[in-house]
Amino acid sequence: MEYLSAGDDTFRFSFSALSTAYEQVEPGVFTEVLYPNSMEEIAEFFVRECIRRELRFRRCKSCGKFFALTGYANTEYCDRLFGDSSKTCKEAGAVRLYRTKVTADPVIQAYNKAYKKRFAWIKYKKITKEAFYEWSELARAERDKCLAKREATKDGDTKLRALEELEQWLKDS
């Protein structure tokens, strides 16, 4: 039996006969057992298992290694540790995606700057935590309104006005 890889008709994986058996591991529980004659048979057994379970694989956008898609089909990062850090590729990827989004969007930059400024006021007793959290809810709502206005229009002047309105609101609040 041959297995054609997706999108590539030049590579074919040929399966050979494997010597497997079913053995009882507990009363009433049986499992498939492989009796390999070579390392290739072990690898082939795992390939068969992946096909039987219909596992899909994807290349991680952080480390470039393949990983099995076991959860969501749109997962882009694996759960391996990223480089020398204690974070996984999934965590590092989320941080990188957030930073890219923040640096690319002036609305989010303006909101974050005001948020950090107000948050620092708590430390210096210029504002209470309760007042800060009330303000942050209103600020998030204003930020979301601004983003919605920008998405709804193609006009550059309208987008600029929406940003200026948000900046003015952040300054006056």
Image (cartoon, rainbow, N blue to C red):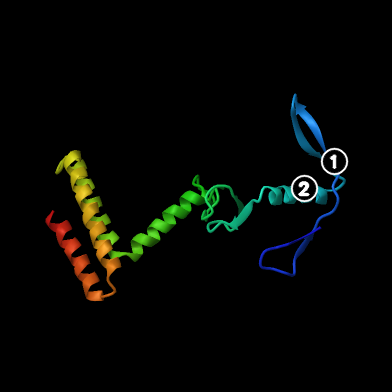
> Which residue is painted at 81% across and 32% down in the image?
23
Which residue reaches farthest top?
Answer: 27
86 sits to left or right of 5: left
22 sits to left or right of 75: right
Please tell me which residue lies in front, 102 or 72: 72
> Which residue is painted at 18% across and 39% down in the image?
130
Residue type, mark 2 in image: Phe
Which residue reaches farthest left?
Answer: 172
Measured as percent of width and height from the top left, residue 127 is found at: 15, 43
Q: Are marks 2 and 1 in contact (CB under 8 Å)?
A: no
Structural distance between the alpha carbons of marks 2 and 1: 10 Å
163 sits to left or right of 101: left
Say if residue 57 shows up in the picture: yes
Label total for image: 2
Measured as percent of width and height from the top left, residue 35 is found at: 85, 41
138 sits to left or right of 38: left
Q: Label 2 crowding class (10 Å Cα cut-off): few <14, some 14-19, many 20+?
A: some
Q: Label 1 crowding class (10 Å Cα cut-off): few <14, some 14-19, many 20+?
A: few
Earlier in the chain: of badge 2 and badge 1, it is: 1
Q: Could you say whether the residue bearing mark 1 is in a helix, strand or loop? A: loop
Measured as percent of width and height from the top left, residue 98 is found at: 39, 56
Residue type, mark 1 in image: Tyr
Please tell me which residue lies in front, 24 or 144: 24
